[in-house]
Image (tube, rainbow, N blue to C red):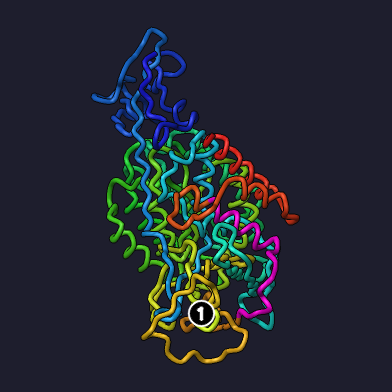
Amino acid sequence: MKKTFKRGINGIVSMALATSLLVGCGGANSAPAADAENPSYSDKSSGYDLNSAEPVEGMCETCDDTGFVEYPIENNETYEKPDENGATLVSTNPLSTFAMDVDTASYANVRRMIEDGYGKGNIPADAVRPEEFLNYFSYDLNAPKNGDAFGITTEISDCPWNKDHKMMFVGLKTGDINTEKLPKSNLVFLIDVSGSMRSDDKLPLLKKSMNEFVDNYTGEGTVSVVTYSGEEKVVLEGEELKNKDKIKRAINSLSANGCTNGQSGMERAYRIAADNFVEGGVNRVIMATDGDLNVGISDPDELENFIKEKKDTGVFLSVLGFGTGNFKDASMQRLADCGNGNYSYIDSMMEAKKVLVEEMSSTMVTVAKDAKIQVEFNPAKVNSYRLIGYENRQLDAADFNDDKKDGGEVGAGHSVIALYEITTADSAKAIDLKYQEGDKKDYGNEYATVNVRYKEPEGSESKLSSYAVSDADVKAATDNMKFAQIVAEFSLILSDSDYKGDASYDHVIDTYAEINNKDEYKDEFIQLVRMVAKRAL
C-alpha cells in the first residue's frame, strides 16, 4: 500500500488517528450507506462521501487490492504564544503583573505528542506553555488562614540552569471543598459532533469521559446537553443529575457528522444555561471539541467578545480539548480565558478521570474570580527578574487595581504556581544604572511583596491580600521547589528557550531521584522526560 500519511507535526501522527481514517471500499470497513438515520451528504473533513462510500474528489490517494482507501493526512493543529518573557530590571520596572491561570491543557497535549513518538524537534515550541506544565501537578502548599481565599508558600533557592541566578517560588492555594456538599449545579455540556470528531480519540473518548463524570459527580442540580455540527441540537435540557441512566443514554446516542457551526451551538447553550440559572449555585457551560470552528463565529476576536459578554451574566465556560491532527489549541485557550473558566486536554481515560472525576467538583466551585497577582520586587535585594511562562496572561501594572480588567478564575482546592528566575542585587551579574539608581529605601530583609487581588464569586469589588518574601524564604530547595524547577527546566528544553542555559535531561532525571513527595502523575512526568531524552541520542 502506498504510504500517504504525514505523521505528526513534523513526521509523526497518532496511530489512533491513522486507523480512524482508513476507510473501506467495501465490506465491514465501508462508509455507511444513506438511510433514514444516515442521510446522504459529503463530508470533506473525513475524506469520503457517506452515501457512495467513494472518496471525495481530491482526497483519495490510492485504493489497492486489499479493499482499503488511504487518504493523505494534513496536520492542521494550530498554536499561538507571545514571545517569551525576558529579564526585567527592577530599578526600571519593579512590578510583575499577571492574571492567575490554572489551565493544564498544554502539558497533557505535549504528553500525548511524546507518547505518540514525537521527539523534541517535532513538538511545536508554541504548544509548550510552562505555567500549564507547572500547574498540572500537586504541591505541598500552605492552606488559607484567617478567612483568606488563598494560602501562600514562598521559597528562594539556587537556579539549576544558571549558577549566577536564583529561583523564587510562589505557590497559592485555595481551601478544599466537601464534595458531599456541593452547591446546586446548572451544567450545560456543549459537544462538538462534527465530522472532524469521528476518530477514537475524539467523540468516542469524550462519551466515555462523560459517562465517568455522570457516574461519579455527587452534586445536585440539572444537566443539559447541546450538540453542534451543521446545526445545533438540544439532546437534554434541565435533566436532574440524579437521573444518571437517562443522561448516559443520551450521551451514548451521540454520533459525529457534518461541518462545525460553533456559533449556533454556543448561543443555544447559553440560552439554556440562562433558563436554568441557579442563584448562588454553579452555572457553567462545558464545551468539548477539537476546536475546529469553521462555520459561524471563527474569528478569535469575535469569539472573545461573545464569551466575555456571556460570563458577565454569571455563567462561566470551561473547555475540554480532544484529538489530534485538527486540534485548534489557540481557539480553545482563548475561549476558556475569556469565559472565566479552565482549559484541559483529554488524551486518555486516565486524564478523563483526573479532569472530570478527581478535579471536576473543585473546578465547578469558583472561590475567586478575576484573580490577579502583582509581585513588587525590592531593588535593594533583587536586581532583575524573569517570570517563567504566563506570557498570554500578562497585565499592565495599572490593570491590577482596575476591577474592570479581567483576571483568572480559581476553583476550590486549586493551586497556582509561579516561578521567577532572579538576579540578586549582590550578584556579580547585577546591572547598575548610573542615572536610575534613585533612593533605595530600606525594607530590611524583604526580597518582594506578593499582592493578590480577587473578587468573590458573587462580588463586583475586589479584595487585596499581601505577603512578604524575605530572607527566611532563602533555603536549600524543598521538594516543592525541586519539582517545580525540573518541570520548568523540561519546558525550557522542549521549547528551545533562549534562557535554558545549562538545562539538561540528565539534571531533570537526577533531581527527580532526590524528591520524596511523589505520585503517579509525577512518576509519569519523569517517564516522559526519559522518552524524549532517548530520542535525542
Q: Find residue 239 and report its image quarter.
A: bottom right
Against 30, residue 344 (above or below) is: below
The residue depicted at 50 percent of the width and 73 percent of the height is 369
Query: Residue farthest to the front?
Result: 428
Residue closest to the far top: 65
At x 34% / y 24%, what residue is drawn?
Answer: 71
Pinpoint residue 8: horizontal percent, then vertical percent: 42, 34
**What residue is disc 1 on?**
377
In the image, residue 476 lies in the stretch drawn in magenta:
yes
Would residue 460 be seen by someone viewing this image from the given angle?
Answer: yes
| Depicted 192 relative to depicted 143: above or below | above
Q: Residue 33, percent across and down?
A: 36, 22
Note whether 11 is above or below 31 in the view shown.
below
Q: Nearer the viewer, residue 3 or 323?
A: 3
**Image location of residue 532, percent across then percent down:** 55, 39
Q: Nearer the viewer, residue 230 or 128?
A: 128
In the image, residue 459 above or below residue 305: below
**Residue 301 pos. (x, y %):** 29, 61
Residue 212 visible in the shown view:
no
**Magenta-drawn stretch, dominant element (helix, strand or loop):** helix
On-image quarter of the C terminus: top right
Q: Secondary structure at mark 1?
A: strand
Which residue: 34% across, 50% down? 262
Query: Residue at image x 40%, y 43%?
Result: 327
Q: Is residue 31 magenta?
A: no
Q: Total marks drawn? A: 1
Q: How many neighbours does mark 1 have within 10 angstroms: few (below 14), some (14-19), or many (20 or more)?
A: many
Image quadrant holding the N terminus, namely top left
Task: Name, please, the residue furthest toward the right.
Answer: 516
Per the rendered image, the range of residues in magenta is: 469-490
